Amino acid sequence: MVFEDDAVNWWSPWLKKECRHCYVIKPSGGKYIVFGKNREGFDLFTTTDEKSIIDSNYMIRSYEPKAGKRSLFMLNTCVGHTKQILGINNPFILTPYQLLKHMEKHNGIHEKT
């Protein structure tokens, strides 16, 4: 999980600075699969160097995905898609900062930069 500052959306002023966007990076066979929701659509690609796509101000957290049932409704945001990938079904997690705090509470802090 990567959390970054992204101040390009109209709702960005209401989000916590330095934690306004989130996406998933998953190691796979010596490469990294990147999945994220952005304003224009989705980012889905592989890369050999995860640091090449991450901005200078970021936080990385590891999280063990849980098998969870899909909810009937999902917000079409970076948080909504990330929660679905990680199997987090809490409907009250709406912002990247809330997701970060949930992950820290339930999984602990594994890496911080």
Image (cartoon, rainbow, N blue to C red):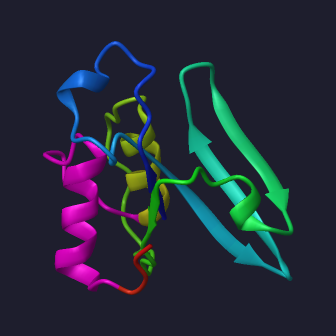
- Compared with 71, 27 (above or below) is below
- In depth, the one of 90 and 100 nearer the eye is 100
Residue occupying the far top of the picture: 10
Nearer to the camera, 73 or 4: 4
Magenta residue check for 10: no
Q: Does the magenta run of residues contain 94?
A: yes
Drawn side of residue 38 relative to residue 12, left or right: right
Q: What residue is at 44 percent from the left and 34 percent from the top?
A: 6
Magenta region: which residues?
Answer: 87-109
Q: Estimate the x, y position of residue 110 in percent, counting from the top left.
A: 39, 87
Q: Is residue 98 left or right of residue 88?
A: left
| Location of residue 94 in the rendering, given as x and y in whole percent from the top left corner | 22, 40
As displayed, is residue 108 above or below residue 70? below
Residue 11 location, x and y as percent? 28, 19
* Residue at 38% in and 54% down: 83
The C terminus appears in which quarter of the rendering?
Answer: bottom left
Determine the residue positioned at 69% across, 56% down: 34
Q: Residue at x 85, y 82 (%)?
A: 29
Q: Nearer the viewer, residue 83 or 55?
A: 55
Question: Which residue is at the far front?
Answer: 56
